[in-house]
Amino acid sequence: MKQLELAIKAVFNSWDSPRAIKYRSINKIYGLKGTAVNIQSMVFGNMGTTSGTGVLFTRNPSTGEKKLYGEFLINAQGEDVVSGIRTPEDLEMMKTCMPEAYKELEENCEILEKHYKDMMDIEFTVQENRLWMLQCRSGKRTGKGAVKIAVDMVNEGLIDIRSAIKMVEPRHLDQLLHPQFEDPSAYKDKVIATGLPASPGAAVGQIVFTADDAEAWHGEGKSVILVRTETSAEDVGGMHAAAGILTERGGMTSHAAVVARGWGKCCVSGCSDILVNDTEKVVVVGDNVFPEGEWISLNGSTGEVILGKQPLSPPTLSDDLATFMSWADEIRHLKVMANVDTPADALTARQNGAQGIGLCRTEHMFFASDERIKAVRLMIVAITPEQRKAAIDLLLPYQRSDFEGIFRAMDGLPVTIRLLDPPLHEFLPEGDLHHVVKELTCETGMNEEEIFSRIEKLTEVNPMLGCRGCRLGISYPELTEMQVRAIFEAAVSVSNHGIKVLPEVMVPLVGTPQELKHQVRLIRNVAAKVFSETGSSLSYKVGTMIEVPRATLIADEIAEEAEFFSFGTNDLTQMTFGYSRDDVGKFLPIYLSTGILQNDPFEVSSLNLTLFPHEESLLNLNC
């Protein structure tokens, strides 16, 4: 009875441990009161050479290959395999030393896959040549593995297409879009160690040795590689924060490997070439010593550890992914549009299947060259309308050229263009006031007194709630006129060359119908002028980005002027909660850890929307 009591307490103590709480928090697991307690008799894998233990996946969790993938230890208990204390042998070895048990294991795996209709993660023990199946569960897998397994199981007749789509999680597809190394052959002379390719992909970061340091450095915006002798459950916070994980000991199914694969993290485990000194915070590789903060790169597909920051490149998409996405396209009802700010990005979006552009941020175009940003600054510091008009005229050809490239790439698809949104101070040079004034004086030819005076007038206590969005267009109508002229001149130009253009002009930060009405009238007047001057015409829409809570409450009134809505959830979130998105990081971790908030509201949005007229309005969620 005492053993039963202690066993039950051990399970619940584990459930309530800080590491378990941290794991549930990272994986957004909420509302569970506890866990079940299973009590069963033991079998022993440490009873000599006819006994052993192992962990396996019924398919390769990294690649999806239909082949048993796992590790095995003779004369050992399960903890010896998963803890990383001993480096296990490949499962293939079991064929030789325990052929009958291995054959039975293969048969059991096939039965379990057919029953559960999924790739399974299985633990087993052999006691004196008799096989015991200890547990099975759905196996964690990489994005590449998830897609291949889903496609293969449909082809094998195990599952249908809808089940296959549910089997692949959004984060799996996200992994497939992560970068790889540009040229693996280029860094061969910089490979300092090789371990097990525990979780594929590439990672570049600075060495840290503790989970706490990984979280702290990540919080400072640094990319880190967590280097440990071996990881344990206590390290999950640091593992989650790290770009990649490197361990000295452990196998392909060790803690580091399994957790990293589940999160899509690059991981190299069981790297016996390195010696980790946690006390002095150094990694020793042969005669070389690498301290904390040293840059390294990991290739989780080959197990290579590379010195320095190696360049990364976008991934390539597999045939399995193309097949999977075609299935999703057959079933889905939503359109998928891209956020694009340049012609090059528009082309990439089109090649990857975007059905249009849901948000083109025009302010990003101004940072493309020194000439553009200087023209913007001339506009900002202009004192007279004539000076401002002259500076704005310099920007017109740049904007027109960018819009032409975007319209060409999106031939036949809608392009939603947001007029200038951010506060003007964001375009000023960085640094102290004296440096800013000196730089602007050189760029504009104005004297320092004029610059000081203009900056003082532009200064706002809270710029995010200041003169931005539609307020800029109303205060400086010539700015809206320039942007709209660039849009329609570009649209007419490419349309005359056989390109089908579907422009949608979006007015940002509207809080009242009057604000939108002012800008809509101006936009339509400029469009009419351009059409008159060019002798051409085309259809277009004018809508708004609703970023102010009041606008959502009077959406029916605003819909009288808008032909489509777009909801800007960043501003809506900070205004609704009263959280500054620039400062929320100071207290958000406390809110999440204490349960005041279950999710970062800037990452997870919950919108209850009612659509008002018009029937053909487009609801565009830029979340």
Image (cartoon, rainbow, N blue to C red):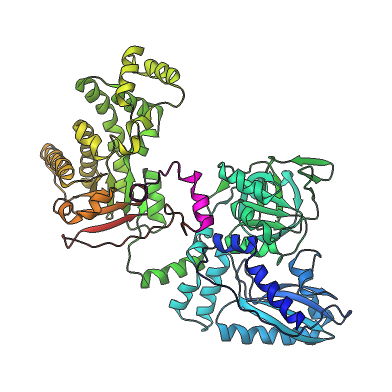
Residue 616 picture location, percent across and down: 18, 61
Considering only vertical position in the picture, is 604 above or below 219? below
Q: Residue furthest right?
A: 48
Quadrant showing the C terminus: bottom left
User: Of residues 145 and 81, which is closer to you in this image?
Assistant: 81
Q: Is residue 346 left or right of residue 485?
A: right
Residue 464 figure quarter: top left
Tell me, yes or no, whether the highlighted magenta stretch contains residue 137.
no
Tell me, yes or no, whether the highlighted magenta stretch contains residue 589.
yes
Write the start and end of the magenta stretch as one range. 574-595
Considering only vertical position in the picture, is 51 above or below 307? below
Q: Is residue 503 left or right of residue 257?
A: left
Say whether residue 302 is visible.
Answer: no
Chief secondary structure of the magenta portion? helix
Residue 319 picture location, percent across and down: 50, 66
Q: Which residue sits at x=13%, y=53%?
A: 560
Residue 391 figure quarter: top left
How many marks the image carries: the answer is: 0
Considering only vertical position in the picture, is 434 above or below 538? above
Q: Which residue sits at x=68%, y=87%?
A: 107
Residue 342 picture location, percent across and down: 37, 43
User: Of residues 374 and 169, which is closer to you in this image?
Assistant: 169
Q: Which residue sits at x=27%, y=39%?
A: 469
Residue 466 figure quarter: top left
